Amino acid sequence: MEKLLFLNIGWMQNYRGLENNKGKIIDKIQGGGSAVRKHKFGHEIFNFKPHKGHMFGYVQLSRGRKLRIERIGAHKEDGHVDNILAFWVSTRPRIRGTVITGWYKEAVVYRSPQDPPANSNRKYKGEVCRFFVKAKAKNCRCLPVLQRDFVIPRGKCGIGQTNVWYADKEKQGRFRKKAIKYVTEGLHQYPT
């Protein structure tokens, strides 16, 4: 079974920061929970901003919590697990519904938040934006807004109130296959 997880983040268009290097607003974050409401940003604002051929992604966890990477193949003593398909999902503004906004293939997922690489410019309002997931940029895809139509189930058979869904129950097998096929067979691409 392919190892994957779904990470619920705030809604943005590009996830390359909120401002350009001259301080001009280039994107905004919507939703994303209480941390975004309180601080007016979340560390996920840089999830698709490449640095030296890699992407570094963040998901907000409850205070003091860690990712339970043993649910995706790690041992309890491991600090990370490799070769994961990490889906980034978000609630659409106005239309509602949680959809896939992008993914990292062949990703490394860390149990605890990691400090970003030096000179990666992952800082906003004086706060260093950490990460839980890392992948080669060539294996990452942020979907254009109009292609974000793959709906993630909510509730008992889907993502709940936490921001991480492992989709590791037997009854979720059919959905897992559908999500993997969406990425591997390019079903997210539309003719131009």
Image (cartoon, rainbow, N blue to C red):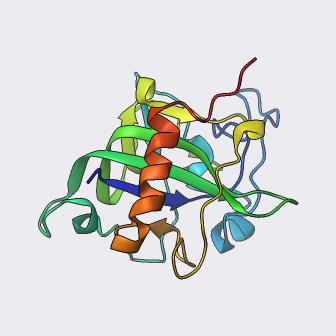
Q: Which quadrant is home to the N terminus?
A: bottom left
Residue at the farthest bottom position: 156
Q: Which residue is at the front of the view, 105 or 56?
A: 105
Depth check: 94 or 109 in front?
A: 94
Residue that extends furthest to the front in the rendered view of this protein: 174
Percent across and percent down for residue 128 are 50, 49
Looking at the picture, how far across and down is residue 70, in whole percent?
Answer: 22, 67
Left or right, residue 16 beside residue 83: right
Q: Residue at x 65, y 50 (%)?
A: 125
Residue 120 appears anywhere in the view: no
Residue 147, quarter of picture: top right
**Residue at image x 32%, y 51%?**
109
Q: Which of the 4 quarters of the picture holds residue 98?
A: bottom right
**Residue 140 rendering spot, x and y as whole percentages:** 47, 32
- Is residue 170 depicted above or below 105 in this figure? below
Which residue is the extreme one toward the right? Answer: 94
Q: Is residue 103 left or right of residue 146?
A: left
x, y percent for residue 146 = 78, 38
Residue appearing at x 37%, y 36% in the figure: 135
Front position in the image: 77 or 118: 77
The image quadrant where one finds the C terminus is top right
The count of marks equals: 0
Residue 86 seen in the current view: yes
